[in-house]
């Protein structure tokens, strides 16, 4: 069991919020506008990657702090966070696929599909805001055992 480090979790949440703020500039672009600027594309990819990784870090830390077993992968970290009551189950199921996107961005398994990234930016701006709110609510509740 890991001791809960609220400061660590809040630093990760701040990174998510910061990245989501930066991604706001991408959210309203058409696919053609997005594709015209390679720096914008790479910036969006990196901001998404960092936000997803920060969310996974939060999941893993809170799951360990509850004394739960460590999930085998990033996808499962979201589902485990849902099962552990850290975030709502429906949000966990919505966010879990972002782990696959993170892996594609980091490891470049396949060519990056710009349309998927642009959709992921829009999804992240909704889902990760809900994630941050759920974690803040979780941290605000007194924990026993």
Image (cartoon, rainbow, N blue to C red):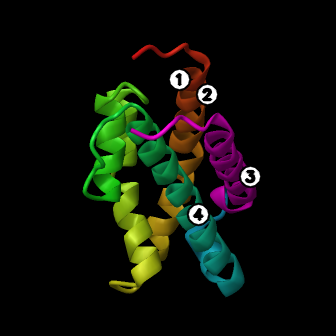
Residue bounds of the magenta highlight: 1-27
Q: Position of residue 104 (x, y in %)?
A: 39, 75
- Seen at 55% across and 41% down, the residue is 126
* Mark 1, secondary structure of its residue: helix
* Mark 4, secondary structure of its residue: helix
Q: Which label sits on residue 138?
A: 1
Against 31, is 107 above or below? Answer: below
Report the residue marked by disc 4: 50
Give the quadrant of residue 137. Answer: top right
Q: Main secondary structure of the magenta part?
A: helix
Q: Are marks 2 and 4 in contact (CB under 8 Å)?
A: no
Q: CA distance from mark 2 to mark 4?
A: 19 Å
- Seen at 39% across and 31% down, the residue is 66
Q: Are marks 2 and 1 in contact (CB under 8 Å)?
A: yes
Mark 3 or mark 4, earlier in chain: 3
Mark 2 or mark 4, earlier in chain: 4
Between label 3 and label 1, give the one nearer the viewer. Answer: 1
Between label 2 and label 3, give the one nearer the viewer. Answer: 2
């Amino acid at each position: 069991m890991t001791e809960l480090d609220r400061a660590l979790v809040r630093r990760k949440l701040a990174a998510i919020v910061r990245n989501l703020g930066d991604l706001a500039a991408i959210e309203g672009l058409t696919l053609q506008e997005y594709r015209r600027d390679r720096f914008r594309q790479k910036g969006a990819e990196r901001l998404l990657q960092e936000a997803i990784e920060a969310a996974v870090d939060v999941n893993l830390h809170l799951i360990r702090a509850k004394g739960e077993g460590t999930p085998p992968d990033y996808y499962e970290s979201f589902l485990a966070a849902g099962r552990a009551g850290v975030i709502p189950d429906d949000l966990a199921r919505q966010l879990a696929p972002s782990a696959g996107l993170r892996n594609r961005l980091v490891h470049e398994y396949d060519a990056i599909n710009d349309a998927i990234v642009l959709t992921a930016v829009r999804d992240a701006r909704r889902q990760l805001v809900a994630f941050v709110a759920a974690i803040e609510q979780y941290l605000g509740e007194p924990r026993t055992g």
